[in-house]
Image (cartoon, helix red, strand yellow):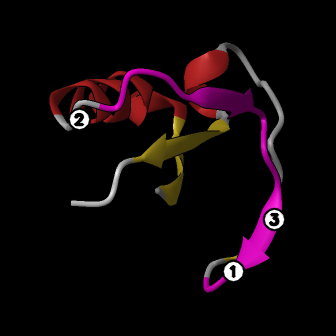
Amino acid sequence: MKKIEVIVSGDNENMVATMMEKANISGFTLLRNVSGKGHHGFREGKILFNDKASFVMFIAVAPEE
């Protein structure tokens, strides 16, 4: 089994969910409003107007190929 973690903007939430489904990943955990620091500096996971303005983190487990 392999653990997969993906952090994307809320705008890309449906795209990632679709990709996981196509990869036969039957379930995942979704964490909204994540914050952290990386190459682009600190990013805060606030909801400004809707869920699309924040970052989300997908956590899933996939079988080894």
Identify the residue at the far top of this view.
Answer: 50
Distance between the alpha carbons at the discs numbered 2 and 1: 24 Å
State the mark number for residue 36. 3
Q: Was residue 34 drawn as part of the magenta stretch in this picture?
A: yes
Q: Pick whichever, 44 or 7, lies toward us.
A: 7
**Residue position for label 1:** 38
Q: Secondary structure at mark 3?
A: strand
Give the class, few, some or many, for how many residues have Cα within 10 Å of label 2's Cα (few <14, many ≥20): few
Above or below: residue 28 compared with residue 60? above
Residue 1 position, x and y percent, is: 46, 56
Distance between the alpha carbons at the discs numbered 3 and 2: 24 Å
Q: Quadrant of residue 54?
A: top right
**Residue position for label 2:** 19
Q: Residue at x 34, y 32 (%)?
A: 25
Distance between the alpha carbons at the discs numbered 3 and 1: 7 Å
Amino acid on which disc 1 is placed: Gly
Q: Earlier in the sequence, mark 2 or mark 1?
A: 2
Identify the residue at the far left of this view.
Answer: 22
Give the class, few, some or many, for how many residues have Cα within 10 Å of label 3's Cα (few <14, many ≥20): few
Amino acid on which disc 3 is placed: Gly
Residue 63 position, x and y percent, is: 35, 49
